Amino acid sequence: MAAESPNLRADLPTIVPTTALAAWFHDAVYDPTDTGNEAASAELARDQLVPLGIDPAVVAEVERLIRLTAGHVIEADDLAGALLADADLSILGAPADLYDRYAEQIRLEYDHVPIGAYRVGRADILARFLDRIRLFQTRAGRERWEHTARANLERERRALLHPEP
């Protein structure tokens, strides 16, 4: 797994600035009615970074990382991807009150979707996360957030599938 790499300290000076740029831009374009947000955010990052004279390899890596946030599917040796994915999903492992506020905000973003369809669709998304062997790619992410994240996702899913009258 990337995060347990013995070269972690050696890799960080290169990985951190690039991953930070990707984190900065990853939701710069966000429209809940569009499925192309990550691609559009990656293009925006490129359009903003190239004129600044940022190394083209860095720009390409920033674009790649932003696109990874679309599905959070990370290769085992991708430390930068693992760090960004864990950061992006960290809200899942927040204390219950913060997670519940996040879930309420998600519902508000999708208020254009009828409640019944929202409940089914959101419950399906949560089930796909819960079906993963691990939600977090790094050891630190798993130790810090995995248990709480699974509890939050289960609780929200139950509430969606069995709403109180």
Image (cartoon, rainbow, N blue to C red):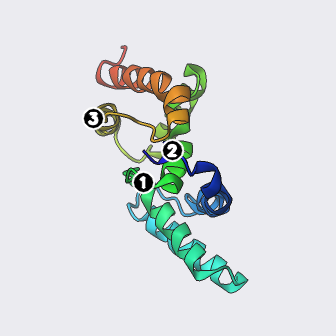
Q: Nearer the viewer, residue 90 or 133?
A: 133
What residue is shown with label 3? 120
Residue 3 numbered tag: 2
Residue 62 in the image: above or below residue 10: below
Mark 2 and mark 3 lie on one chain; the one further toward the N terminus is 2
Which residue is nearer to you in this view: 103 or 135?
135
- Cα separation, mark 3 vs mark 1, equals 35 Å
Of badges 2 and 3, the one in the foreground is: 2
Residue 59 versus residue 39: which sits nearer the camera? 59
Name the quadrant of the C terminus: top left
Residue occupying the point 44% across, 68% down: 39
Quarter assignment of residue 114: top left
Residue at the outermost right position: 52
The 10 Å Cα crowd at callout 2, few under 14, some 14 to 19, many 20 or more, is some
Q: Position of residue 147 (x, y in %)?
A: 46, 22
Amino acid on which disc 3 is placed: Val
Q: How far is mark 2 from mark 3, CA to CA? A: 35 Å
At label 3, counting other C-alpha atoms closer than 10 Å, the crowd grade (few under 14, some 14-19, many 20 or more) is some
Do the residues bearing badges 2 and 3 touch, measured as CB atoms within 8 Å? no
Q: Secondary structure at mark 2?
A: helix
- Mark 1 sits on what residue? 77
x and y percentages locating residue 143 in the rendered image: 52, 27
